[in-house]
Image (spheres, rainbow, N blue to C red):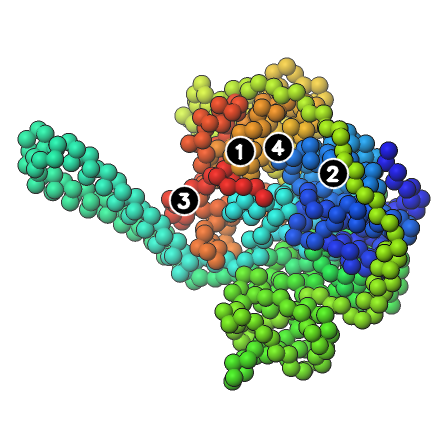
Amino acid sequence: MNDIPIITDAPTPTRPEILAPAGDTPSFLAALAAGADAIYLGLKHFSARMQAENFGLTELSRLTDLAHAESARVYVAMNTLVKPDEPAAAYRLISRLTTQARVDGLIVQDLAMIDLARQAGFAGELALSTLANVTHPGALVEAKKLGANRVILPRELSIDEIRLMGEACPEGLDLELFIHGALCYCVSGRCYWSSYMGGKSGLRGRCVQPCRRVYRQGGPAAQALVRNAEREEMDRARQEQSRMDIARKDRRGGSGRDRDGRDGRDGRDSQFRSRNEATAFAQGRRSGRQASLRSPGRKEHSGRWFSCLDLSLDVLAKTLLDIPHLVSWKIEGRKKGPHYVYHVVTAYRMLRDNPGDPKARKTAEEILQMALGRPATRARFLPQKDNIPTSPEGQTSSGLMAGKIRIEQDGSVVLKPHLELLPQDYLRVGVEDERWHATLPVTRRIPKGGTLIIRLPKHKTPKAGTSVFLIDRREPELMRILKGWQARLDQLPGRQSKAVESSPRMPAPVKARPRPDMYVRSTIPQGKEMRGGKNQLQALWLSPRSADISRTMVSRICWWLPPVVWPGEEEALQRSISRLWRDGARHFVCNEPWQRGMFPDSLDEDADLLVGPFCNAANAPALGVLARMGFTGAFVSPELPREEMLALPKQSPLPLGAVISGFWPVGVSRFGLLGVKPNEPFLSPMGEPFWARQYGGNIWIYPGWPMDLTAKRQEMAAAGYGFFAHMQENPPASLPEMKRESLFNWDGALL
């Protein structure tokens, strides 16, 4: 039985809870000391912040008891994608959480967690993470139907959209909103960048933040891209010529003459001509490409185009008061230290409790300045200011600028700080993608303008002028406060773990259901493109333009719904779906589970409603939930590696399909572009090409090379996959054809 204490002081829209992050015990205690109403944290597994220290269950049981003694709630983030072999482990962990830690709620992304939590007897709140992508009013209704108690709203919403969501929210469902902390450039749950580049998935809490890097475009960057492509073309030409030479030699039978009696010199001439033709072909492609890249104004530019500032609503947070169902103000920062947690919680408590007090507002702003975050932005919160929260030429690394490196004549590396440094302060030299990047503690007090000698390995010696940031502070007064809280914690006994004997009920698997291949386009097919074939089905991304297609073609197309729907887009999308349905369309792919609510509750027998790949379905319990919602099949998450991809069909209660070729987006963003030109390639620090394109109000970022699992098709079909999709996105004309192709994580691992 779940003995969760009932905390009577429940949050309300007029007095929302201040929800604080905790990545370790000192930060948890700092949240309590600052007066947080609730704390969220992660465990050693199934947490979307795996770089944080996180918590064990015995330790968590003591911390939860301490929080409950202060009438504070504790929520555990189990907000990762669940792989095919993980449901049983997740079930056992939730069972132990229920009996041992007795926390108040779970934060989840994967629909499997809702099913497993209820099977495990968990009676606390279930909150859907931003990773679950509940972005529009109708999605709230579907979330409530699935058993969610709370939805965490996306960070991209304006105050008007937040109010619209609150007014549309069904009774019995609460809302939570991030008011402070780090921002991701891509929409939460719609970023595959880190995973596509090496299997470290943001949906698994392993993101390596490729968005924080410096990218470059135009000029030498464009020429370097062309040169790389030319080398690949020449390599291909030489390989093809070598193959032809071997074939000719085989035909001659090893003699100087061909088998038809011709002199071998003709063959050599032919080889010479063929080699020249191959070279000329490559040079012709090169000259055409160079011509396209010689347009005026192609000077190289670079920047951290996708590195966001920190969200800080600060004094604007008072506008959230009294929005229906919005009962939680959330602070991001599970990788931050106690200094940050204590200061940010203190500031927002002041702003909540004294919304009309100018003195309190000024004090809160001063406290936030010392919280050691990045420079701040309001992002899209103010609708009249469509701010892009990036600063490509500025500093978007976390911490307070402490000064810049000086190199003395004797070669020593020196910092003369702009502010006093205290023992146990933590400094960061440079930024993460610089060779000399390092973090180090301060061991003694350094007065403002004093001298701190920075000792680093010789190969990490920074250049003069490198910025140094104060990223954490353990001031004596805060340490004294935390010591008192630690003493209270030490007096509490921890509850020990008990083995879980039961197992979760898994849905019954079904057999494969073969379907035609889908060729997914953003432009309306013309002429022969519509004819397809017996094993082909044309698919279109649904948009206002594509929905105006001829009525005679409507039923012959599979309609792919967008992976993100914003509040102002829902009504138009619903009208398009209703009209298409009326005109005979029955093939749809939903790229949010919540889009099920846009179709009739009772579907026709010929209705074909598939789960799209952006739903990130990756395990049997989640597929069971989707089957009960009325879906007839599912595309699996494209992130899965080979072993897990092949295991899933034998477990699935829905017929499965997979995306096997084409340009798969590494991310979708609402924040717009600042510095980078759309529809032109840009390069990463490693020379990898990408490009960006705008569709509606969103930016789609693509890699410069396509995903290609077509060689694995037979193996996938044998495992039980019945249908496949090909993403037919046209790359920019200035993007050279790349030899490199991606198997995504097929040959690797999904960490």
Q: CA distance from mark 3 to mark 4?
A: 29 Å
- Which residue is labeled 4 in the image? 84
Q: On the picture, is 371 further left or further right than 406?
A: right
Residue 740, disc: 3
Q: Residue furthest bottom?
A: 409
- At mark 3, the secondary structure is loop
User: Dot 3 surroundings within 10 Å: few (below 14), some, or many (20 or more)?
Assistant: few
Q: Nearer the viewer, residue 153 or 69?
A: 69
Residue located at (58% from left, 74% from top): 455
Element under disc 4: loop
Quote the CA–CA distance across marks 2 and 4: 16 Å
Disc assigned to residue 93 = 2
Residue type at mark 4: give it: Pro
Question: Which numbered disc, 3 or 1, marks the residue that appears first in the sequence?
Answer: 1
Quarter of the view holding residue 667 = top right
Q: Earlier in the sequence, mark 3 or mark 2?
A: 2
Q: Is residue 152 visible?
A: no
Report helix, strand or loop for mark 1. Answer: helix
Q: Which residue is mark 1?
A: 643
How many other residues sit within 10 Å of disc 2, few (<14), some (14-19) or many (≥20)?
some
Badge 3 or badge 4: first in the primary sequence: 4
In the image, 650: left or right of 598?
left
Q: Secondary structure at mark 2?
A: helix
Give how far across and how far down residue 412 sits, in percent: 55, 80
Q: Decide if residue 86 is in sight here.
A: yes
Of the 4 image quadrants, the one containing the C terminus is top right
Query: Looking at the image, which residue is at 73% across and 54% down?
Result: 23
Tag 1: amino acid: Glu
Disc ID at residue 62:
none
Identity, as a three-letter code, of the amino acid under mark 3: Arg
